[in-house]
Image (cartoon, helix red, strand yellow):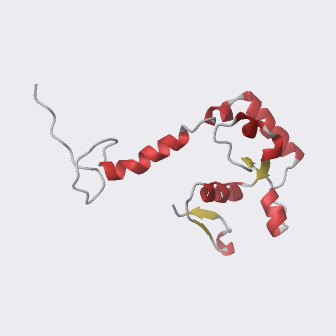
Amino acid sequence: MPTAPRRACMVAGCLDYVSKYGRCVTHAAPIIKAREARNEPGRHWYQTTRWRKLRARILAAEPLCRHCLERESRPVPATEVDHIDRHRGNAIKFWSMKNLQPLCSPCHARKTATERGHAVARLPEAWGGRVKSLG
């Protein structure tokens, strides 16, 4: 039975052959890493009713971003609940109210990117001061 011809990597300028996801080994690595990050232990807890109730309780008790209040002394509504210490699948750390803090989306994105080792830049205030991940 004949085999299909090998295809080149879909990334422009790459001449290696496809291994997975239409890309060569080098260009498929970041995709595989991102998929593994989504499958980290304890990730499924975010989809539970228990988490939704706990999240709502945290945001109701403390509706302003903790980082913005402490660092910049300005009230910004919190939209996310963040784990102060990464839980990494540890149920005690995940569900502990002492390990949770309310943050606005830019502060949460900055903290998460920093924890994961990505470079983070702060855009000028004229552009809204949003956070942009560089990694």
Q: Is residue 92 above or below residue 135?
A: above
Question: Between residues 33 and 10, which one lies in front from this camera angle?
Answer: 33
Residue 64 in the figure: left or right of residue 107? right
Residue at figure coordinates x 26%, y 45% from the top left: 18
Is 53 positioned to the left or the right of 40 in the image?
right
Classify the position of the N terminus by image quarter. Answer: top left
Q: Is residue 38 above or below residue 132?
A: above
The single residue placed furthest to the left in the displayed view is 2
Residue placed at 82% from the left, 41% from the top?
Answer: 97
The spot of residue 122 in percent (x, y) is: 64, 69
Residue closer to the observer: 105 or 134:
134
Furthest-top residue in view? 1
Q: Position of residue 40 (x, y in %)?
A: 57, 39
The answer to whether residue 83 is above or below residue 126 is: above
Residue pictured at 68% horizontal, 47% vertical: 86
Residue 30: where, in percent of width, then height? 43, 50
Q: In the picture, residue 118 is in which quadrant? A: bottom right
Could you say which quadrant of the image residue 91 lies in?
A: top right
Residue 36: horizontal and vertical position, in percent?
49, 41
